[in-house]
Amino acid sequence: MMKAPIATHVLPAHASFDSGELVIAGISATELAKKFGTPAFIIDEGDFNARARAFNTALKNAMGDRAGHCYYAAKAFISVEVAKWVNAAGLSLDVCTGGELEVALAAGFPPSRIEFHGNNKSVQEISRAIEVGVSHIVADSEIEIERINEIAGKRGVKQKILIRITPGVEAHTHQYIATAHEDVKFGFSIASGAAMKALSLAKSSANIEVAGVHFHIGSQITGLEGFDLAIARTIEFLAEVKREISEELAELVIGGGFAIAYLDSDQTIDAKQVIEHLAGIVKEECKKAGLAVPLLSIEPGRAIVGPTTVTLYEVGTVKSVELEQGSRNYIAVDGGMSDNIRTSLYDAQYSVALANRISTSPTRASRVVGKHCESGDIIIRDCELPADIQPGDLLVTPATGAYGRSMASNYNHLPRPPVIAVRDGRARVIVRRENYSDLLSLEVASEE
């Protein structure tokens, strides 16, 4: 039996290769490309729902009556349809801009299960969040605390907030997505005293209720040591709060950032094991500190949507480039950094495979590149692909559900790809492909 070109644990749950062709939820890559065009994001709806429910169930089982919210982090990828899936799965929703909030509201998502993040929320965003009745606003600066208090006062309400703290943990991830060390734009430092000062300001604000604290140590975290240390330092802070103001804060949000597999060599995480471990650390540290266990909330995003989605591309050109040692095929596809900026931005690595046919050709050193006018427009920097790849072939890159479509751009005025949901042999568009009319719709012509 021929080995599958991509390991099963990197693909969506209902995806496999049949005689060399990728099939997702009973639909072939060729059929999907013919019907919806390329490039396209293909999301396994059943896989998304299963992963969402797994995290929610894991939190409830691990924490019992001390389970808070399992927030889906909308920044990974959100659309009206996905927000409906999140709601149906019983999860709450974490948004960080007014735009993400409006998508949630358009989906009929209950504001009482929405948490509003962001390090620079505008007055308009805070006003809208309070107007619709979001459950929590995560305060990220003293200016925000003052804004929330003023706006809530004008509306005659008392707004729940969480104080975002930075526990001073260096997560083992890319510097751009590590968020809990001291020299970073997010939150209030515990070590410097800024967190306690912010808490005091919030507690003295008549129109604010301090529900608890929040931290997030980064994204694509492969080990749990950073979480363990961040939890320990945060519980120490909560103990200090109790000593200072004789009050125990009721809620603790420990963020997300759980890693997923992008390559065959990457390990996948088990939601049950991870949440059980983190819940155990919280309980243990609270016991040592003499604190009641707070309501514990988590914010998985990438770990839910990332593995559920693949990107289909069509090969446009193939060029052999002679190097000092051997040669390399440059395989250009019809997308690029406009639908996957992560390779250029983070040096992210992805798997890739021929998706429309079986090939018996020997493999050759290859680089998969996009169609943009940038040398750095690279999707897969180093890979081995069949030497007989030709224009019209389809390539697939798995694990593109998180930060693919959500970070997509119109660079070079390229329309953004659609998102196609597949389930039980059926496919439907949940975000349509942009067209040139969309690109021109914002233009304002001068009158002459």
Image (cartoon, grey):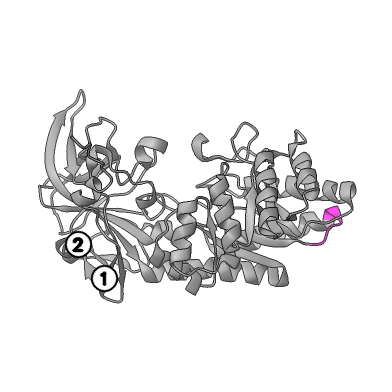
Near mark 2 (Cα within 10 A), the count class, few <14, some 14-19 or many ≥20, is some
Query: Does the magenta run of residues contain 424?
Result: no
Residue 166 position within the rendered picture, expressed as x and y whole percent measured from the top left: 67, 41
Residue at which label 1 appears: 427
Mark yes or no: residue 225 visible: no
Q: Which quarter of the figure is the N terminus placed in?
A: bottom left
Task: Give the number of callouts.
Answer: 2
Near mark 1 (Cα within 10 A), the count class, few <14, some 14-19 or many ≥20, is many
Mark yes or no: residue 26 visible: yes
Left or right? Give the position of 178 relative to 63. left
Q: Which quarter of the figure is the C terminus placed in?
A: top left
Residue 2 position within the rendered picture, expressed as x and y whole percent measured from the top left: 23, 60
Q: Quadrant of residue 336?
A: top left
In the rendered view, tell whether residue 374 sits above or below residue 61. above
* Along the viewing direction, whichever of 6 and 77 lies nearer the viewer: 77
Our reading of the magenta stretch's main secondary structure is loop
Q: Quadrant of residue 329?
A: top left
Residue 293 position within the rendered picture, expressed as x and y whole percent measured from the top left: 77, 62
- Per the rendered image, the range of residues in magenta is 288-292
Give the SS element for disc 1. Answer: strand
Residue 380 position within the rendered picture, expressed as x and y whole percent measured from the top left: 29, 41
Residue at which label 2 appears: 36
